[in-house]
C-alpha cells in the first residue's frame, strides 16, 4: 500500500532548487513540491544542471547557474519554468528560453531595499574610509585619536550620480535625500517622479557633475564596460565610485588605474566581474571598501525572494500569468 505521504509526492510537481535558500523558502517548497534540493550548495556545472533538471517541472536557480543557449537547448522538455532568485538575469539566455517555450521569472521587488541599503553602506564606507579604519584597529596599530587621521568626506551637499534609475536607483535616491545630497541620475528615460533628482540624458553628462557615483544599472550589452578609462576621466578629480549592480559594467584595469593615479579617491564595491575570482588588483588598494556581493543578504529579502520565486512558479504551473515574468 502506498502511504498518503508517498501518494502526495507522486502527484506534486517536481522542483529543482539549485542552492540552499532560506528555511522559510525550503519549507514552503517541500510542502508544495517534490523537491530536489542541492544540499551541497555548490553551483552545478552545466552538465550537472542539465542532468539534475531532467524530469523537473520547475527550476529555482541563482546567479551562479549559467543558462546559456547550449544549456537551455539540452534541458528536458519537462521543464516549464526557470525562476531566478535575483533581479539580475544576465546568467539566463532569455531568447533561447523563449524559443523553447520555457517561462523565465525573477524577483525584482524583493531585493530593492536591501540592495539600496548596501548601496549606502558602500557610499559611507568609501567616503568615510571604513575599511582602512577597521584594518588599523584590528592590526592593533591604532594609537589613539588624531585630528588628521583617516580624513574622509561628508555626504551632505555632494552630488550623487545614480547610473540607472530603476527600483534600486530610486530607493538610493530616496535615502540620499535623508543625507542632504544633490541627486542626479542617468537613465534611458526621465522618470515622472524622480524624487527631485536631476535627469541627465547621457552618462557623460552625469559623470561630469558627479562627486559620488552609484552604479545601479543592469548588465546589458549597452552597459557592459561602460565605466572605462574614458568614462572615469569624465568624473571630477577626487570622485568616489561605488557599484551595487554588476561587476562587468566596470573595466577593472581602468578603475584600478584611476584609483592608483589618485583621480578616483575612494571606491566601494559589492559586485565584480568574474565573481568570486575578482581582479587581484583590488586587494592591494588601501582606499577600497570591498564587500562580497552581499547586497541582498538579509533574511527579509531572502524570504521575500523565495516567496516571489515560488509565487511565480505556482502561477506558471497552474496555467496563470506569473506576477514577474521575463519571458
Ligand atoms: C540580484 O538579485 O541580482 C542580486 O545580485 C543577488 O540577489
Image (spheres, helix red, strand yellow):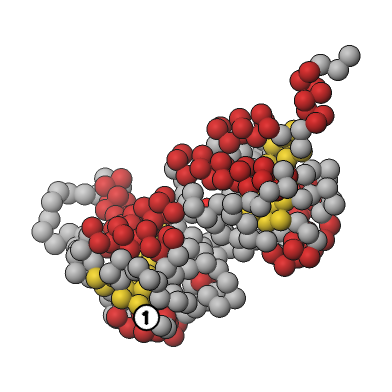
Which quarter of the figure has residue 232? Answer: bottom left
Q: Residue furthest right?
A: 1
Q: Position of residue 295 (x, y in %)?
A: 45, 52
Residue at horizontal 61 percent and vertical 43 percent from the top: 311
Residue ID for mark 1 = 200
Q: Position of residue 198 (x, y in %)?
A: 31, 76
Residue at horizontal 24 percent and vertical 70 percent from the top: 182
Label 1 Cα neighbours within 10 Å, binned few <14 / some 14-19 / many ≥20: many
Residue at horizontal 77 percent and vertical 50 percent from the top: 80
Instruction: Please tell me how many numbered marks the rendered image carries.
Output: 1
Residue nearer the viewer, 312 or 236: 312
Which quarter of the figure has residue 12? Answer: top right
Q: Residue furthest left?
A: 147
Image quarter where the C terminus lies is: bottom right
Image quarter where the N terminus lies is: top right
Q: Position of residue 313 (x, y in %)?
A: 67, 45
Taking the image as shown, residue 280 lies to the left or right of residue 130, namely: right
Q: Is residue 153 visible?
A: no
Amino acid at each position: 500500500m502506498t502511504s498518503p505521504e508517498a501518494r502526495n509526492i507522486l502527484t506534486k510537481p517536481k522542483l529543482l532548487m539549485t542552492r540552499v535558500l532560506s528555511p522559510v523558502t525550503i519549507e514552503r517548497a517541500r510542502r508544495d513540491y517534490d523537491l530536489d534540493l542541492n544540499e551541497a550548495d555548490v553551483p552545478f556545472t552545466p552538465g550537472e544542471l542539465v542532468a539534475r533538471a531532467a524530469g523537473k517541472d520547475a527550476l529555482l536557480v541563482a546567479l551562479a547557474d549559467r543558462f546559456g543557449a547550449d544549456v537551455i537547448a539540452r534541458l528536458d522538455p519537462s521543464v516549464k519554468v526557470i525562476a531566478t532568485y535575483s533581479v539580475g538575469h544576465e546568467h539566463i539566455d532569455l531568447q533561447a528560453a523563449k524559443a523553447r517555450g520555457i517561462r523565465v521569472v525573477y524577483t525584482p521587488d524583493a531585493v530593492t531595499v536591501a540592495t539600496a541599503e548596501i548601496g549606502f553602506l558602500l557610499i559611507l564606507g568609501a567616503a568615510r574610509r571604513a575599511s582602512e579604519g577597521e584594518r588599523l584597529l584590528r592590526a592593533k596599530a591604532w594609537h589613539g585619536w588624531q585630528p588628521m587621521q583617516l580624513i574622509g568626506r561628508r555626504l551632505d551637499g555632494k552630488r550623487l550620480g545614480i547610473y540607472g534609475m530603476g527600483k534600486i536607483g530610486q530607493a538610493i535616491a530616496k535615502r540620499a535625500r535623508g543625507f542632504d545630497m544633490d541627486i542626479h541620475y542617468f537613465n534611458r528615460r526621465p522618470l515622472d517622479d524622480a524624487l527631485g533628482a536631476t535627469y541627465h540624458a547621457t552618462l557623460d553628462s552625469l559623470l561630469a557633475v558627479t562627486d559620488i557615483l552609484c552604479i545601479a544599472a543592469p548588465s546589458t550589452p549597452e552597459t557592459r564596460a561602460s565605466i572605462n578609462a574614458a568614462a572615469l576621466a569624465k568624473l571630477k578629480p577626487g570622485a568616489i565610485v561605488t557599484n551595487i549592480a554588476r561587476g562587468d559594467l566596470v573595466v577593472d584595469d581602468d578603475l584600478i588605474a584611476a584609483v592608483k593615479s589618485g583621480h578616483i579617491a575612494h571606491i566601494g564595491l559589492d559586485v565584480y566581474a568574474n565573481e568570486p575570482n575578482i581582479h587581484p588588483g583590488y586587494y592591494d588598494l588601501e582606499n577600497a571598501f570591498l564587500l562580497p556581493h552581499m547586497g541582498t543578504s538579509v533574511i527579509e529579502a531572502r524570504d521575500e525572494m523565495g516567496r516571489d520565486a515560488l509565487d511565480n512558479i505556482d502561477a506558471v504551473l497552474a496555467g496563470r500569468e506569473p506576477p514577474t515574468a521575463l519571458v
